[in-house]
Image (tube, rainbow, N blue to C red):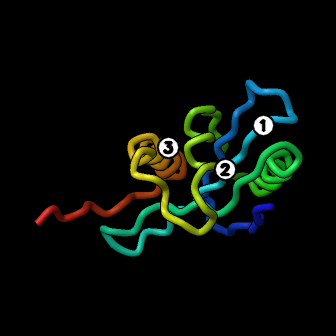
Amino acid sequence: MKKIRRSSNPLSVKVTDAKEPAKSSIAVAIEHRPKGPNSLPKIVASGRGNLADKIMDIAFAEGVRVREDADLAEMLAAADIDTEIPVEAFIAVAEILRYVYAADGTQMAEVDSS
């Protein structure tokens, strides 16, 4: 069983597969707390079935933005809790975070490429 931790970070994103029946639903929570140009989003919760439902209940209760993406949910669910997102998920997660930051009116600092 994977653990669930509440996050006070309003920028956490839940990814779920709503197309599947409840028994095989997946929910993954990611969190991004930038500490510099090399800080990446981390997976903070992951579960299937009833555990996925609990993750979603917490997300909705806490006002966390939710995105449905079955392929991304599967990819992120394969990673361990408290690890950075897999390289293959960078573009999809970056798009989600860009949307979340824009919706919250948060301005992110530009990363210096030098």
Q: Name the residue: 53% across, 66% down.
A: 83
Type of amino acid under label 1:
Ser
Nearer-N-terminus badge (1/3): 1
Q: Name the residue: 57% across, 55% down.
A: 79
Q: Name which quarter of the figure residue 26 lies in.
A: top right
Q: Give residue 57's position: percent from left, percent from top.
A: 84, 49
- Secondary structure at badge 2 equals strand
Q: Provide the residue designation for mark 3.
A: 96
Query: Could you tell whether 89 is left or right of 23 in the image?
Result: left
Q: Give residue 35's position: percent from left, percent from top.
A: 40, 75
The residue lying furthest to the top in this view is 19
Q: Give residue 48's position: percent from left, percent from top.
A: 78, 45
Q: Name the residue: 84% across, 27% down.
A: 21
Q: Provide the residue designation for mark 2.
A: 28
Looking at the image, is mark 2 or mark 3 nearer the viewer? 2
Q: What whole-number distance in Å separates the C-alpha atoms at marks 2 and 1?
A: 10 Å
Q: Provide the residue designation for mark 1.
A: 25
